Image (spheres, rainbow, N blue to C red):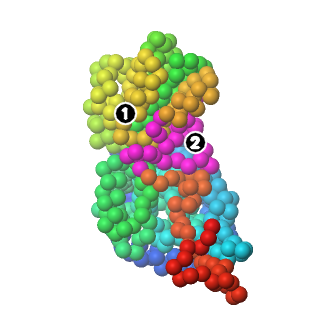
Amino acid sequence: MIVRENPARIREVVGRVAETDPGAAVRRAEAAGREWSARAPADRIDALRRSAAAVQARAGELAVLLARETGKPLADCRGELAFALAHLRWVCDHAPRVLGERLFDDEAGRLLIRRKPYGVVVCITPWNAPVILAMLKLAPALAAGNTCVIKPSPLAPLAVSEVAAALPGVEVVHGGAAAGQALVGHPLVRKVAFTGGDAAGRQIAAAAGAMLTPTVLELGGNDPALLLPDFSLTGQDYERLVMASFATSGQVCMAAKRLYVPRARAGEFTAAYVAAAERILLVGDPLTPGVTMGPVISAQAAERIRALVPGTAVPLGRSTGDLGAGYFVPPVLVPDLPDDAPLVTQEQFGPAVPLLLYDTVDEAVARANHSELGLAASVWSADEDRAFAVADRLEAGFVFVNTHNRTGMSLRAPFGGVKRSGHGREYGEEGLLEYVQSTVVHAPAAFRPGGPGLAATAYPLP
Ligand code: NAD
């Protein structure tokens, strides 16, 4: 039995889930797939739209559950559910076009290209945004005719299980790394979609590789936010930059994790940043109105993050309520760190952000790119064209301009990392195409009745 406590009030149990047999879940998903994949695509889309309506009807109650199990402020949890449903509806609207078959019947012959589902897709997801990160896999996979087995994180298994139960063709498995490994290594599994950290990602890739099972891996990031020398930020822009690092207590893959600021403007920047944090950052219980930052996910996470923060850190924001009751870590800005400090080189995944000063843009770009990770990044400038030019030099799968993190996402834009931040994409058309394989039926013109034929060794002419 997995027991989940409220990270803001450790003594309060939010819920329990029973661990499940991974093999049995895969077999059920495989059996269900025969009927689901044979349905007309429009029938599948109708079923998914009904699921969206069913989740929508319970969104208020599910947001509270999500806030209590993750420690994320209630408004964030409402937003996550709304965005997950928006993504599901986007998939319903676009899947028929993107996944539709293509038929050519012309002078070159008759050619049919179909997008076929893989079969059983295993989805393994983390705790930081459990509902949206699940939906990014389930919605396109189901629309394409796959069935799914999802294994959420044992640290946030509750709200996502309710959402998954409202979707057709989904089995939920509860457990930790061992359950995940059993799923990835199962011979009936045809594709694995994983979001999580580097260590688990490597183990999943190895287990999937041993089975020749393809993967989508959405891994960690160490995103730079690069303020160009001409940056021009209003108070609201500063608040957005603060929340780009501290939303979900910094536990977001695409949080702004390193701030690069021109040395000549360091004093002005720090004063405005600290003032913006004082306005926007209120630390406390996620269910308290006005709170914008809750605790971190666990005692181990709090300990790991505290060990990364040196004594020179500048405290940020305000707090309310009893922070001793949960896994709270106070938000800080950390100036004067060398580039090889652990807070700079590692993904901190917590509410501490280093302030790094630079002298030239070339130097800043080189330092921003000096990482094995390449998930997202941002460029802040008064000149959008200049920002786009610098963005092109950053090694990242997604570069935001004058924003960063959730406020910069787009349902139509593919998201995913370069370098060791993973492979494959979520969102947009690319996110749909991850869950299909193209299959072809071809009658070349040369061999259709009355055709001219070709020598047995020939290639067709272009
Ligand atoms: P994690 O890697 O510890 O766990 C993620 C999931 O994998 C959980 O369900 C866990 O039980 C399972 N798991 C762990 N080890 C496993 C193994 N060996 N085999 C199979 N399954 C295993 O990650 P986390 O701590 O839950 O999440 C934090 C990480 O996720 C951060 O690095 C963050 O950047 C990353 N993340 C990435 C994205 C993205 O889109 N790229 C989004 C959110 C989070």
Which residue corresponds to the image point at 48% horizontal and 27% vertical from the top-left? 226
The secondary structure type at the circle numbered 2 is loop
Q: Alpha-carbon neighbours of circle 2 within 10 Å: few (<14), some, or many (≥20)?
A: some
Calculate the distance from the C-alpha at mark 1 to the C-alpha at mark 2.
24 Å
Amino acid under disc 1: His
Is residue 446 found left or right of 248 in the rendered image? right
Give the mark nearer the N terminus: 1 vs 2: 1
- Residue 127: tell me if it is visible: no
Magenta segment boundaries in residue numbering: 394-422
Foreground residue among 265 and 50: 265
Image quadrant holding the C terminus, namely bottom right
Residue wearing tag 2: 409
Is residue 63 found left or right of 373 in the rendered image? right
Q: Which circle, 1 or 2, is nearer the viewer?
A: 1
Vertical comparison of 166 with 445: above or below: above
The image quarter in which residue 100 lies = bottom right
Residue 245 in the image: state x and y as whole percent: 46, 32
Vertical comparison of 65 with 106: above or below: above
The secondary structure type at the circle numbered 1 is loop
Vertical comparison of 84 with 306: above or below: below
The residue positioned farthest toward the bottom in the image shown: 449
Amino acid under disc 2: Met
